[in-house]
Image (spheres, rainbow, N blue to C red):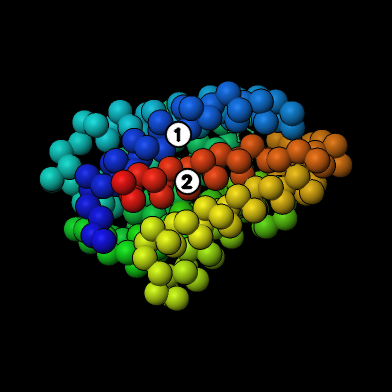
């Protein structure tokens, strides 16, 4: 498929809707090993993105500019750690497709991989440290592998979602080494990381928003 700025806007709208619906669960998860604001932070961020994109002239906007607008509005709206992490993801995603008026499937996979790498670089977290990286990195790897194997974008994002779900679930058995929950040490064991949980929601909504 070919993805244009209207498709990207619809994708962000779908994410905002999914995160809003998941807000309370994400706050509850963050209440166990953090400060209970993760759902609120993510909803503030994606609602701000939705509002900012609503005022863009999509026909006159390139995908990179749309992602930069998303980055700026997310960062300005969110005071929590997830703010700079997702802002960097959108900025890096935009940089990966610079100069393109529309995106082919492979371009979107490159964008998706750059988002995951951006989160990893910004937070300096490695897999196994019980963060959103434990969902994003395997998701990006699965999407890239499916793309190389010649799968459609929908199938690539399906594979990414499944990998993110497995990655998020695996954070239960990890001791937090980054972010607020790292202060708990071993007491973080047994609980899913809220940022990994919200990554599953974001990736699921990306798939839904682009496929529909
Ligand atoms: P805060 O902890 O500032 O309240 P949020 O509640 O919005 O921020 O987000 C918490 C989530 O952010 C964690 O569950 C984790 O997934 C993610 N996170 C925190 N620090 C890092 C980091 N250094 N690298 C990657 N992800 C991180
Ligand atoms: Mg928090
Ligand atoms: Mg907080």
Crowding near pointer 2: few (<14 within 10 Å), some, many (20+)?
many
Where residue 81 sits, quadrant-wise, is top right
- Determine the CA span between mark 1 and mark 2: 9 Å
Q: Residue at x 30, y 28 (%)?
A: 51
The tag on residue 188 is none
Q: Where does residue 102 sit, x and y in percent of width and height? A: 21, 58
Helix, strand or loop at label 1? It is: helix
Residue wearing tag 2: 204
Q: Residue at x 26, y 47 (%)?
A: 7
Residue wearing tag 1: 18
Q: Where does residue 198 sit, x and y in percent of width and height? A: 56, 39
Crowding near pointer 1: few (<14 within 10 Å), some, many (20+)?
many
Q: Residue at x 35, y 44 (%)?
A: 209
Q: Earlier in the sequence, mark 1 or mark 2?
A: 1
As drawn, 134 above or below 15? below
Residue contact between numbered discs 1 and 2, judged by CB atoms under 8 Å = yes
Q: Nearer the viewer, residue 123 or 202?
A: 202
Q: Where does residue 109 sit, x and y in percent of width and height? A: 40, 63
Left or right of 118 in this view: 207: left
């Amino acid at each position: 498929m070919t993805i244009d700025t209207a498709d990207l806007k619809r994708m962000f709208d779908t994410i905002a809707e999914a995160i809003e619906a998941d807000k309370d669960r994400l706050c509850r998860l963050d209440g166990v090993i953090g400060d209970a604001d993760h759902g609120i932070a993510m909803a503030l961020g994606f609602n701000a993105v939705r509002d900012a994109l609503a005022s863009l002239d999509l026909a006159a906007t390139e995908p990179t500019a749309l992602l930069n607008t998303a980055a700026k509005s997310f960062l300005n709206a969110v005071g929590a750690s997830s703010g700079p992490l997702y802002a960097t993801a959108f900025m890096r995603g935009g940089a990966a497709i610079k100069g393109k008026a529309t995106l082919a499937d492979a371009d979107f996979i490159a964008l998706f991989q750059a988002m995951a790498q951006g989160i990893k670089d910004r937070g300096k977290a490695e897999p196994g440290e019980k963060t959103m990286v434990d969902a994003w990195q395997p998701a990006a790897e699965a999407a890239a592998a499916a793309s190389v194997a010649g799968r459609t974008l929908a199938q690539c994002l399906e594979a990414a979602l499944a990998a993110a779900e497995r990655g998020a679930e695996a954070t239960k058995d990890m001791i937090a080494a980054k972010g607020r929950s790292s202060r708990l040490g071993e007491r973080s064991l047994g609980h899913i990381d809220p940022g990994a949980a919200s990554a599953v929601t974001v990736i699921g909504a990306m798939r839904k928003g682009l496929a529909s």
